[in-house]
């Protein structure tokens, strides 16, 4: 569930009308609900109550805004990081690096050194050569690096091809057949301390089946590793999918109900009911690394209609947000509900497109929308995960601003970039100056 609801004909985030935010801060504007993030984190954390010592490590690649990271750190979250930059953000936000796990297939020496200095909980190692590199860096610092090897269980997660990670087609992790040999090598290296084992099969997974399949496949290996090494944790990764909120649809006029029906929700309860009985007997500390589930439905991207343009073929609703602000529809054909910030009469069928010079710059195709016109505001829902985090300055468009809502309070948690930000750090080579 989330806190974007219609009250008195206005779409609100918690106690604030989104139109007020759009007018106050301008558009494009990302808006996040503190209550939704808190609620999602707590529901997952509670559902795992049967696993003593478990740790929810928020995958901050989904949303790394300092305020979001701080909010989750305050709730007790750990973090799944994937770069030195993300670790820096944890530190800047006041989070605890000792609750961080560091994934990624290409960790550089500089990143490894920084992570060791910050005393992270574990490196989630993605290849045999990476272990050698971590060992070398740890030794040069007189340290032992805590590691877990990421097992690729070769399980199909039935999700979009660009976000599946748990099969041998992907670059991630070590093939399940090879994992024991890589641990055996790691155990011989004085700069390495084996701490756990990790797995992540993909993203936007909307049923428990693929998780259960992957865990069942990994269990014999995990038990064997427990008998051989001093294992402390098993991370089963992230990937819990989100669905569009049917409650919001039923609270709206007919055009709103025509959005595709949500597939079955994978609630924290259902996820835990299936997985906790498999995991509890291990007696290991269980980690999960959810990103999208916690922040996806907690965010919306507000945008203003610039023009409505008709061709003999189509109607285009041209808005002031572009694929540089939210790339998911262009990249994954992802669906985001698009709703007006105030009640309107009538509908139209249109492509909702941005101002960027690419045909891929669209948010929806042939979508039945509220009949909007120039100057009206729209919200793209479910934009809290992989929205701002994947934004770029393409077409020299400044980054949107971000606002956090808490009840009736709201605060800018990232200022809108100005034109001067766009050229910061760039210069004209001396020889070009005449
Ligand atoms: N752990 C690892 C090792 C990961 O690679 C990921 C996501 C997660 C956890 C968190 O997955 P989540 O719970 O958010 O599904 N940009 C794509 C999603 C890419 C996910 C990459 N890895 C999108 O917009 O759908």
Image (spheres, rainbow, N blue to C red):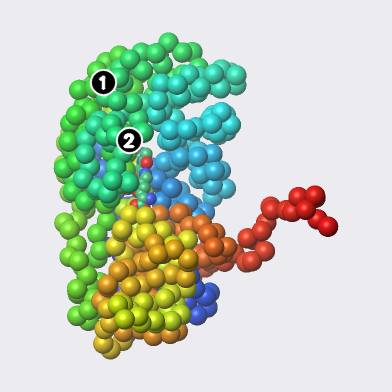
- Between 248 and 322, the one lying in front of the other is 322
- The residue tagged 2 is 170
Q: Is mark 1 within 8 Å of ligand 1?
A: no
Q: Is residue 401 visible?
A: yes
Residue at x 52%, y 54% (from the top left corner): 66
Q: Is residue 170 left or right of residue 404?
A: left
Q: Quadrant of residue 274?
A: top left
- The residue tagged 1 is 177
Residue 352: image location, x then y, percent: 36, 72
Q: Quadrant of residue 318?
A: bottom left
Quadrant of the snapshot with the N terminus: bottom left
Quadrant of the snapshot with the C terminus: bottom right
Q: Earlier in the sequence, mark 2 or mark 1?
A: 2
Residue at x 19%, y 80% (from the top left corner): 254
Q: Quadrant of residue 302?
A: bottom left
Q: Is residue 390 left or right of residue 174?
A: right
Residue 205 in the image: above or below residue 190: below
Residue at x 30%, y 14% (from the top left corner): 228
Residue 291: image location, x then y, percent: 36, 49
Q: Which residue is the extreme one toward the top?
A: 188
- Quote the CA–CA distance across marks 2 and 1: 15 Å
Q: Which residue is the extreme one toward the right?
A: 434
Density class for disc 1 (Cα within 10 Å; few <14, some 14-19, many ≥20) is few
Q: Is mark 2 within 8 Å of ligand 1?
A: no
Give SS at disc 1.
Answer: helix
């Amino acid at each position: 569930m989330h806190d974007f609801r219609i009250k008195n004909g206005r779409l609100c985030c918690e106690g604030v009308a989104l139109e007020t935010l759009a007018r106050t801060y301008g558009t494009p504007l990302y808006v996040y609900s503190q209550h939704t993030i808190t609620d999602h984190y707590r529901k997952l954390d509670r559902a795992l109550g049967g696993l003593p010592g478990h740790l929810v490590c928020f995958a901050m690649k989904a949303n790394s805004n300092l305020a979001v990271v701080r909010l989750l750190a305050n709730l007790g979250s750990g973090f799944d990081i994937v770069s030195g930059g993300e670790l820096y953000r944890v530190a800047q936000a006041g989070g605890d690096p000792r609750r961080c796990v560091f994934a990624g297939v290409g960790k550089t020496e500089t990143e490894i050194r920084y992570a060791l200095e910050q005393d992270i909980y574990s490196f989630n190692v993605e290849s045999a050569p990476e272990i050698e590199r971590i060992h070398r860096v740890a030794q040069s610092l007189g340290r032992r690096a805590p590691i877990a090897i990421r097992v690729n269980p070769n399980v199909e997660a039935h999700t979009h091809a660009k976000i599946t990670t748990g099969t041998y087609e992907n670059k991630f992790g070590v093939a399940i057949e090879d994992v024991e040999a890589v641990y055996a090598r790691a155990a011989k290296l004085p700069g390495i301390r084996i701490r756990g084992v990790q797995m992540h099969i993909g993203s936007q997974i909307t049923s428990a089946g693929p998780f259960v399949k992957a865990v069942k496949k990994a269990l014999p290996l995990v038990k064997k590793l427990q008998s051989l090494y001093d294992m402390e944790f098993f991370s089963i990764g992230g990937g819990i999918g989100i669905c569009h909120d049917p409650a919001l649809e039923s609270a709206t006029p007919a055009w709103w109900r025509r959005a595709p029906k949500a597939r079955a929700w994978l609630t924290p309860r259902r996820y835990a009911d299936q997985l906790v009985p498999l995991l509890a007997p291990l007696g290991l500390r269980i980690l999960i690394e959810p990103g999208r589930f916690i922040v996806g439905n907690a965010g919306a991207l507000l945008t203003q209609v610039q023009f409505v343009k008709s061709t003999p073929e189509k109607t285009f609703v041209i808005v002031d947000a572009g694929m540089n602000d939210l790339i998911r529809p262009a990249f994954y054909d992802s669906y985001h509900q698009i709703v007006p910030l105030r009640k309107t009469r009538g509908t139209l069928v249109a492509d909702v497109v941005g101002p960027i010079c690419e045909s891929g710059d669209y948010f929806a195709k042939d979508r039945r929308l509220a009949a909007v016109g120039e100057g009206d505001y729209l919200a793209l829902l479910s934009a809290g995960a992989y929205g701002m985090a994947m934004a770029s300055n393409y077409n020299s468009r400044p980054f949107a601003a971000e606002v956090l809502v808490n009840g009736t309070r709201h605060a800018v948690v990232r200022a809108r970039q100005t034109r001067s930000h766009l050229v910061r750090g760039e210069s004209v080579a001396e020889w070009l100056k005449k």
